[in-house]
Image (tube, helix red, strand yellow):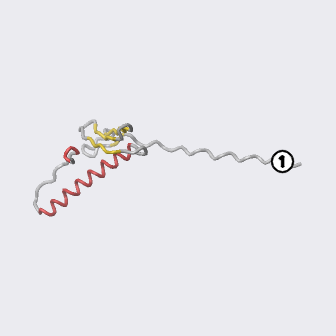
Amino acid sequence: MGKRKSRAKPAPKKRMDKLDTVFSCPFCNHGTSVECRLDMKNLIGEASCRICQESFSTVITALTEAIDIYSEWIDECERVNNLEDDEEDQDEGSMPRKRVSTSEWD
């Protein structure tokens, strides 16, 4: 008589690492001062700094995480600063660069 074949046990599920929810501010460079909030009811995500009171809000989806909101904020800051650099190159003036806050984006 032969042995019964045993079933192979399923592979254990891989545990995903938790993503950050607090970040450093791109304006005041204070570590862990930016907190991201996700409002799934209204589909709005907001990142705001507790130190310098800068904030950024964007439209989110069901798959959006806090890191996505922060990344969009950083990308938008870089885009605005690059626009200023292009304008300065066209003007060929020696005006000093100014710091752009998120309230001036609209």
Placement of 96 over or under 101, stated as above or below: below
- Residue on which the image places disc 1: 3
Q: Is residue 92 left or right of residue 5?
A: left
Q: Is residue 69 left or right of residue 85?
A: right
Q: Residue at x 29, y 39 (%)?
A: 48
Q: Nearer the viewer, residue 106 or 70?
A: 106
The disc labelled 1 sits on which kind of residue?
A: Lys
The total of numbered circles placed on residues is 1
Q: Residue at x 35, y 38 (%)?
A: 42
Residue 43 coordinates in the image, percent (x, y) = 36, 41
Residue 15 coordinates in the image, percent (x, y) = 54, 43
Placement of 90 over or under 77, stated as above or below: below
Q: Secondary structure at mark 1?
A: loop
Which residue appears farthest toward the front when viewing the image? Answer: 42
Residue 24 coordinates in the image, percent (x, y) = 32, 43
Badge 1 crowding class, 10 Å Cα cut-off, few under 14, some 14 to 19, many 20 or more, is few
Q: Nearer the viewer, residue 42 or 57?
A: 42
Q: Is residue 46 left or right of residue 10?
A: left
Q: Residue at x 38, y 43 (%)?
A: 66
Q: Is residue 20 left or right of residue 94?
A: right
Which residue appears farthest toward the right when viewing the image? Answer: 1
What is the quadrant of residue 60 in the picture?
top left
Residue 4 coordinates in the image, percent (x, y) = 81, 46
Q: Residue at x 38, y 37 (%)?
A: 41
